[in-house]
Image (spheres, helix red, strand yellow):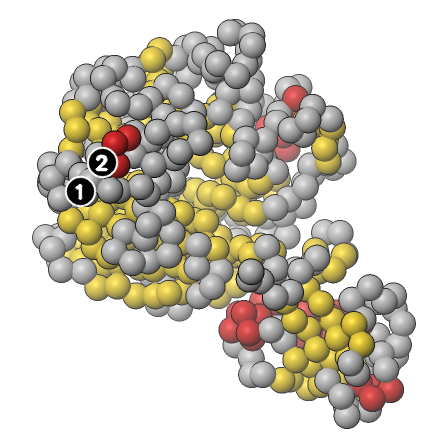
Amino acid sequence: MSGVRVLVGTRKGAFILTSDARRTEWEVSGPHFPGWEIYHVKGSPVNPDRLYASQSSSWFGQVMHRSDDGGVTWETVGNDFAYAGEAGSHQWYDGTPHPWEFARVWHLEPSLTDPDTVYAGVEDAALFRSTDGGATWHELPGLRQHTTGMEWAPGAGGLCLHTILLDPSDEQRMIVAISSAGAFRTEDGGETWTPINRGLHSDYVPDPDAEIGHCVHNLAMHPSRPHVLFMQKHWDIMRSDNGGDLWTEISGNVPSDFGFPIEVHPHEPETIYVVPITSDSLHYPPEGKLRVYRSRTGGNEWEALTTGLPQEHCYVNILRDAMSVDTLPSAGVYFGTTGGQVYASADSGDTWTAIVRDLPAVLSVEVQTLS
Amino acid sequence: MSEILVRLPGPLRALAGLGAEIRLPIAGTPTQRAVIDALEATYPPLRGTLRDALKDRRRPKIRFYACERDLSHADPDDPLPDAVISGREPYVILGAISGG
């Protein structure tokens, strides 16, 4: 029988939520790695029982874990993330050079074809790859060593590589996003990279045509159309129909064009989801109403999805990796909040229920559709 | 060969699946570096958790105590106190207390 497994990373451990395809009754396991920050947990699309988890702590540093039984048991794997060659420097908040220094793994992206290959997006921003199930990690240095690298500067959350999109039609093509450098694309498996930020406009960047410096919060892509990209930027929701060569704004009627995650419906490539958040220092939903906004037109025209979500006194945030979709016929949409709730919809967002309500602050939500 | 009694903080005991104290055989002169080298070799999940694996420096929120002394800033290649080398006193590794 088909079902789903929801992998939840929180400030104080990981949780695994499972259900059958009806998605009405949930079993909760965890906390796994209690007390540790779990930035991201993600499963291999080739072997769903192969999971990778990024576990970190300001006391004990970065630890990486792998499971081969769907999260029942875990083993530690390699945690050496050494930058290739001379690390050099990027720009610090005050404009001075700052040495590149590894802090943590923000995002894990398992290969679409090989369960032993997984990419890691790290802070300070760089892309690493393991081809041995996480035992060893090697940087793809062409990204960090891009000619603009010395000018990259951190956002409030650090200089983090937080989004990795793999093109299912071309394994040499990847797209990543870095706060606050922008989005970058490779067509040669990570050897060389092109900034893809034309059309982005950020009030804090004085040059309206700046090649880098944009605070991209998240990117999304439907696997059937890898050249159509959606972006939630620090301000503005954006779309590109040419793989990022040019972006156009699609914020339309959302009550705030600020937010973190963006997702695409699994069966409708023009249906996208965002969660508006009040910028810039508040970081909670406008009017205290938790609303997912859905566009069925690829942007510009948005509808608020509110059934089952709190519509008063709600002041949580939804972080960039904390939203995901399943691929069941009636599509499921999931997101987690900094208040510890994980909400699920089994009808493309029309109605919502909380699977759990009192977890630690949720950092990431990933969903696996199990056959 | 000395046998050093080591106490680890709770999160690292859980990470490595260890009890409150472990006895760690050390060949040669027992120093802080030798103890941590042996810990990482014997219990691979602990690699990089006490010191930055890339920079070989103590993680700033980790402290090393023995015989009522804070050895955190001592030369890691100095011999450990005699009472630790003889196994009468533990070598204590702990995380800085958080709170407020």
Nearer mark to the viewer, of 1 and 2? 2
> Where is residue A200 drawn, in percent x and y?
44, 13
Q: CB under 8 Å between callouts 1 and 2?
A: yes
A204 on left or right of A262: right
Q: Secondary structure at mark 1?
A: loop
Chain letter belonging to callout 2: A
Q: Nearer the viewer, residue A351 or A245?
A: A351
Task: Specify the label residue A289 is tagged with.
Answer: 2
Q: Residue at x 32, y 43 (%)?
A: A316
> Where is residue A51 drawn, in percent x and y?
39, 55
Query: How far is mark 1 from mark 2, CA to CA?
Result: 8 Å
**From where the camera sits, is residue A45 visible?**
no
Q: Secondary structure at mark 2?
A: loop
Task: Specify the label residue A309 is tagged with.
Answer: 1
> Where is residue A4 drawn, in percent x and y?
21, 53
Q: Amino acid at mark 1?
A: Leu
> Where is residue A232 drawn, in percent x and y?
37, 26
